[in-house]
Image: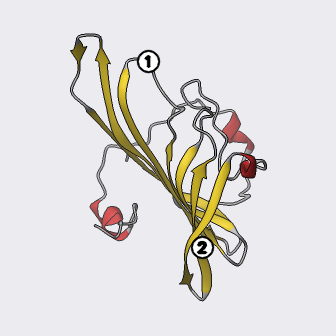
Amino acid sequence: NFTGFRFVGPTSPDAFDYYNFKLLKTRQRDETPVYTISVTPKTRITPLFRGKLDVIGDSYSLIAVDVSPNEAFSIPFVSRFDLRYTQQFGFYENRYWMPMDIGLSGFVEVSLPGFSFPAIAVEQASVIYDFKINHEVHDSVFTKAPRIELSTATTFDSLFWAQHDVLPLTQEE
């Protein structure tokens, strides 16, 4: 669900009813094939996505997403809405593909009869790292106050940020 629209995703169990898939290329990652697959909606009236998926060949796990909503996704008074959703996954504990970063970017133009606003650019990136899979959680976590501020939260640790790549660079970067 997104802004009142219910999308069928390209990894849904019934995705083949809604999408056409086409293998674009195969490349190697540590001697394992990675398949880049194009995703094209079969209809223009159901909210769906178009774009590319990367799937790794040893487990057929999804490792990257780069999609945009189709023309069925429309918002009143928005004359132009170009949105792009990206996500990359990393391999953790030699077993789990977990999200590493999530990106949302695009342009929005709002117009009313006789009046229009300049385009608004949207760009958001989130990075997720240091997963603990099935990590034991102490009972006290559930009884603590909802917000706890650490005394070090206002201190900038330049050494930490210099040693940790928090957002992988794109090929262009």
Amino acid type of disc 1? Pro
Q: Is residue 28 left or right of residue 104?
A: right
Residue occupying the point 35% across, 26% down: 79
Q: In the image, is residue 83 above or below residue 40?
A: above
Q: Secondary structure at mark 1?
A: loop
Residue 2 at x, y = what percent? 56, 31
Q: CA distance from mark 2 to mark 1?
A: 37 Å
Q: In the image, is residue 15 above or below residue 57?
A: above
Which of 145 and 81 lies nearest the eye of the viewer?
A: 81
Q: Is residue 112 left or right of residue 52?
A: left
Q: Label for residue 76?
A: 1
Quadrant the C terminus occupies: bottom left
Q: Secondary structure at mark 2?
A: strand
Q: Please give the residue where the numbered disc 2 appears in the rendered image.
A: 35
Residue 128 in view (yes/no): no
Residue 3 at x, y = what percent? 54, 26
Which of 169 and 3 lies nearest the eye of the viewer?
A: 3
Q: Is residue 63 left or right of residue 122?
A: right
For the residue carrying disc 1, how many other residues have a C-alpha within 10 Å: few (<14), some (14-19), or many (20+)? few
Residue 94 at x, y = what percent? 68, 75
Which of 78 and 146 lies nearest the eye of the viewer?
A: 78
Q: In the image, is residue 69 above or below residue 111?
A: below
Q: In the image, is residue 108 above or below residue 64?
A: above
Considering every residue shown, the one lying at the far right of the view is: 13
Q: Label for residue 30?
A: none
For the residue carrying disc 2, how many other residues have a C-alpha within 10 Å: few (<14), some (14-19), or many (20+)? many
Q: Is residue 163 left or right of residue 42?
A: left
Residue occupying the point 52% across, 31% down: 73
Q: Give the total number of marks visible in the rendering.
A: 2
